[in-house]
Amino acid sequence: MDARAAILCAAAAAGVLALGAAQAQEDDYSPPKTPWGEPDIRGTWPVGHLTGTPFQRPDEFGMREFLSDAEYMEREARLEAAAARYENEDAQDKIGMGHWAETGKPNRRTSLITDPADGQLPALTAEGQRRSDAMRSTWQRDIAFDWVTDFDTWDRCITRGMPGSMFPFMYNNGIRIFQAPGTVALQLEMIHETRIIPTDGRTALPAQILHWMGESRGRWEGDTLVVETTNLHPGPTAVNGGSTVGAPRENNMPVGENTTIVERFTPTGPDTIDYEMTFTDMDLYEAPWTVHMPWRRNDGFGMYEYACHEANYMVRDYISASRAQRAQASVEAN
């Protein structure tokens, strides 16, 4: 065995041992308890480290859920190069994407979607496609803007909706968890929303009462917080364009009044949570789909005002520019 092969074998063995140790920690870990006896998961859990992980799995990985050592090193190098933009801009006395976008950290997942097994969003049903075709957003190309209905709720700074609000984006990735007896609250930096999740066993709302973020009910299964969300108001996209590499770009993945979202928050160490979300709506998608995200605590993460509001002049400017563009095209055509 030559020296290079020996090094690679040693690295692989170390990786296996590290994974085994991590799995042992996950299996054995018991989180501290709140004064009222529930698992304590309070803290700040930003998800910006996941922006470098594809939402849907690239074709070259097939059915593989994890990267090889060589693929991991390639991802690590790419993300390190992207992170260097900040220092490069500082050195040139400039502010650009390096100061704006939050660069992810490498991990071994080939995609955030873990089910279906190919890491792809399921196909839309005929009804799902009909609703998708009717959705409008500034993320779409070659559409006319004439009124506020030509913009989605994120364009209008109303909401990202669910489950989109839980996925990483290029900025404003802060998530804070607060707990009180019978309640868990999730504060989201993007669109400055807070999800209030009762855990006291109260009954669900009537089906006809719909919210942009849905109505959530939580329960504890051992140390895992399980949250079921229903009563979702159609309108927001299920997956935001630009969430990560591989996310649908046009903000046209529908959510419906019969959508059910089940989230599982499992603490796996003092500073880690295993987050899993399953989306089910057989009216709109041909199968359920599941996203898996490893969370990391960062209580030093600063959350700032998301200065976006429904009366944002961007909406007016889009409409004015779109009308002017079409008027000019009409003049040129005649």
Image (cartoon, rainbow, N blue to C red):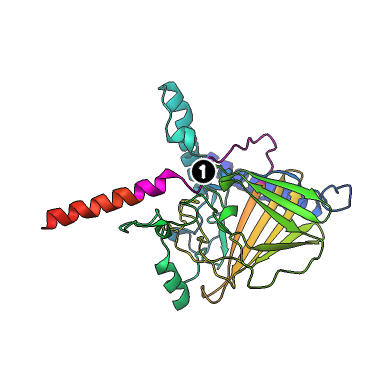
Q: The N terminus is located in which quarter?
A: top right
Q: The C terminus is located in which quarter?
A: bottom left
Is 53 placed above or below 62 here?
above
Identify the residue shown where x is 40% and y is 54%. Answer: 139
Q: Which residues are magenta?
A: 296-318
Crowding at dot 1, Cα within 10 Å, few <14 / some 14-19 / many 20+, comes out as some
Identify the residue shown where x is 56% and y is 47%. Answer: 191
Q: Main secondary structure of the magenta part?
A: loop
Tell me if residue 125 can be seen. Answer: no
Is 64 placed above or below 43 here?
below
Q: Nearer the viewer, residue 45 or 195?
A: 195
Q: In the rendered structure, does residue 301 fall within the stretch colored magenta? A: yes
Q: Nearer the viewer, residue 19 or 283?
A: 283
| Left or right side of 260 for 110 | left
Is 89 placed above or below 164 here?
above
Q: Nearer the viewer, residue 280 or 244?
A: 280
Give the percent coordinates (x, y) of residue 40.
80, 48
**Element under disc 1:** loop
- Residue pointed to by mark 1: 308
Question: How many labels, in total?
Answer: 1
Tell me if residue 100 can be seen. Answer: yes
Q: In the rendered structure, does residue 260 fall within the stretch colored magenta? A: no
Give the percent coordinates (x, y) of residue 29.
80, 51
Give the percent coordinates (x, y) of residue 161.
56, 57
Q: Amino acid at mark 1?
A: Cys
Give the percent coordinates (x, y) of residue 238.
53, 61
